[in-house]
Amino acid sequence: MCETCEQETRKAKDLTRRKALALGLGLVAAGAAPARTRAASDAPPPKPENVVSPDEALNRLMEGNARYVSGVTKRQDFVTERQALVGGQNPYAGVLSCADSRIGPEFAFDTGRGDIFVCRVAGNFVDADNLASFEYAVGELNTPLIIVLGHESCGAVKATISSVEKHVTLPGHLPALVEAIAPAVEAVKSAPGDLLMNVTRENVRRNVGALTSATPILAAATGEGGLKIVGGVYRQQTGQVELLG
């Protein structure tokens, strides 16, 4: 290769490296920015009543659960809500719930459309997909609260306990559930009390921790006080949600 060609090649490589560095720094800066400073527009939120603090959001959830437990729930005006939500959403809470058909977060907290942002997976554990979903809810929709909601008699937790105790590999893709929940089993397998409930609670706590420490978006939002992440267990017989300390 001639000297001129070598010089041109070096210039091209240097330019490519500079562009890559600039792009990388831009992405880091964007990722490190406070999660809740971006606004899609100056338009009023679809549901102004959903613009609340984290503590107000939690109180509202638990008040809704109390109505659900008592059997006296609000009448939902779905027609009006549909029109209000055509242009967007601003849920006041996110819920990471088990996929169990007996657990309906919208019912359990007596909420309307556009009120809660729900991700469901058997065993209510954090994975890349629902983490990204909650990052969207917090970073773009300004959701101030996330609750990880476990429940009594969870089939995914039962299956994991059985798999761990009997050293049995479950069929299909079920081992992925076992892998996610097994650390909770190992953590409390020697603790006194009911093993199933102990694992259920421990699994909730661990996933609250996983969300709270998830960088850059959720960790930044919790650190700034704009987001609260809590855990709870749904009681099958009463419908009551027991918050975990």
Image: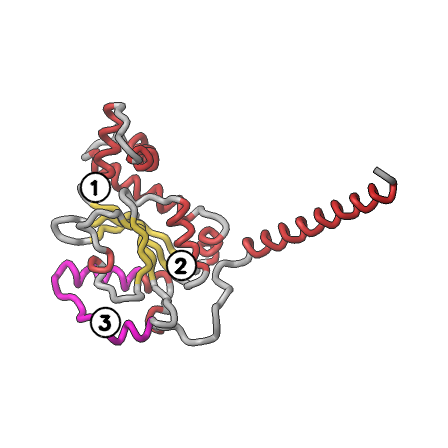
Task: Report the colour scheme.
Answer: secondary structure
Residue neighbourhood size for the residue with mark 3, other residues' Cα within 10 Å, grouped as few (<14), some (14–19), many (≥20): few
Identify the magenta region: 58-85
- Magenta-span inclusion, residue 83: yes
In the picture of the structure, the residue carrying the numbered disc 3 is 78
**Residue 228 x/y as whole percent:** 38, 56
Work out whether residue 208 or residue 13 is closer to the camera in this orientation and state it: 13
Name the residue located 48 percent from the left edge and 62 percent from the top edge.
36
Asked whether the beta carbons under mark 2 and mark 3 sit within 8 Å of each other, the answer is no
**In the picture provided, is 29 more to the left or to the right than 195?**
right
Residue 197 inside the magenta-drawn segment: no
Task: Classify residue 173 by image quadrant.
Answer: top left
Main SS, magenta region, reads: helix
Q: Identity of the amino acid at label 3? A: Phe
The residue positioned 62% from the left and 55% from the top of the image is: 26
Q: Distance between the residues labelled 1 and 3?
A: 31 Å
Q: Name the residue under label 2.
A: 137
User: Alpha carbon of mark 1 to alpha carbon of mark 2: how far?
Assistant: 26 Å
Identity of the residue furthest to the right in this view: 3
Query: Dot 1: few (<14), some (14–19), or many (≥20) neighbours within 10 Å?
Result: some
In x, y percent, where is residue 142? 42, 63
Q: Seen from this angle, which residue lies furthest front? A: 1
Helix, strand or loop at mark 2: helix
